[in-house]
Image (cartoon, rainbow, N blue to C red):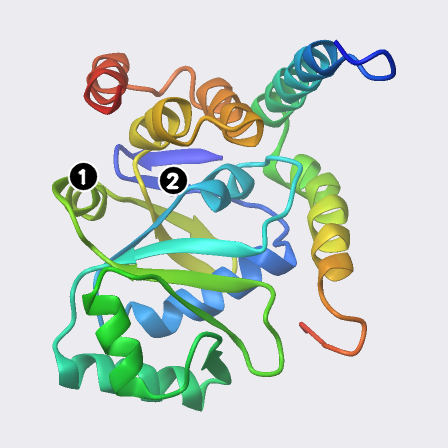
Amino acid sequence: MNKWFDKARNKKERMKFVELWAEYVRTHSDKDWSRQQKVVVDSQLKSLIAPNKKLD
Amino acid sequence: MEFIDNKTIKLDKIPTLLDEFVVDFTKILQKHAKYVIVSGYVSILFGRSRATEDIDIIVEKMSKNKFYDFYSDLQKNGYWCVNIENKDEILRMLLDNLAIRFAKKQNIIPNVEFKFVKNSLEKNAIKTSLNVIMPTGRIKISNIELQIAYKEKVLKSDKDLEDAKHLEMIFKDKINNKLLEKYRKMLE
């Protein structure tokens, strides 16, 4: 284990969040979860695209 | 999300830029060949909170003329091939089982990683694909059991295991467990 970062623990915590979010998606309306997902996906995608290029 | 029948899911989501890109591309593709979307985008479509640079699409093999028509249609609709421009070279790569990438002109990301079907598993993925109907359009994705097993047993990165867990939880009441186990054993 790295003294500065516990990779195994981080992996476990990430998976816990994946499960929590999946349960939210499963039990809420498409409009509800997709409104939140759109913020994450669109911002990640825009940050990957060169600033002078346009997607939309 | 609503299961209209065992092959069709209605998804009333607010589309992300990725969803719009995929619907736009597949509207062109579906006029020319059978296809199936596989891998990361399938999990993202159903809510995973991450983006991806590329959308993996497996397409039935096309004849030379069919492919030229498709490529011309893509170009007319503002797409380009990121790898090479010459259509003969693109087709040669595809027939050599190499993937090529299509993106909107002047962009590289996001892109479609496009490949011809090359084995029985991929043929099966096209044959057993699911229809997903969204407000913006209709697309074809791989069956969920195959996606989960492939991510768990073949790809296996942290991201893929998270994608598999997400799908398994979202579809926990709908998954065919026998089929999932069959795929898991087959891919081990």
* Disc marking residue B9: 2
- Residue located at (50% from left, 23% from top): B161
> What residue is drawn where x is 21% and y is 13%?
B178
Image marks 2 and 1: residues in contact by CB distance under 8 Å:
no
Is residue B31 shown to the viewer in this render?
no
Q: Nearer the viewer, residue B19 or A28?
A: B19
Quadrant for the C terminus of chain B, please.
Answer: top left
Q: Is residue A17 left or right of residue A22?
A: right
Mark 2 vs mark 1, CA separation in Å: 22 Å
Residue B93 at what x, y percent from top left?
A: 27, 71
A43 with respect to B145 (left or right): right
The percent coordinates of residue B80 (x first, y second) are: 47, 81
Q: Earlier in the sequence, mark 2 or mark 1?
A: 2
Query: Where is residue A38 shown, x and y percent of the image?
Result: 70, 48
Q: Tag 1: residue type?
A: Leu
Q: Residue at x 64, y 21 (%)?
A: A18
Residue B99 appearing in the image: yes
Vertical placement of residue B123 versus B31, above or below: above
Residue annotated with mark 1:
B121
Residue A48's place in the image compared with B85, above or below, is above
What is the crowding at mark 2: few (fewer than 14 residues within 10 Å), some, or many (at least 20)? Answer: some
B76 relative to A37 in the view: left or right: left
Task: Report in which chain the residue with disc 1 lies.
Answer: B
What residue is rendered at 35% in x and 23% in y?
Answer: B153
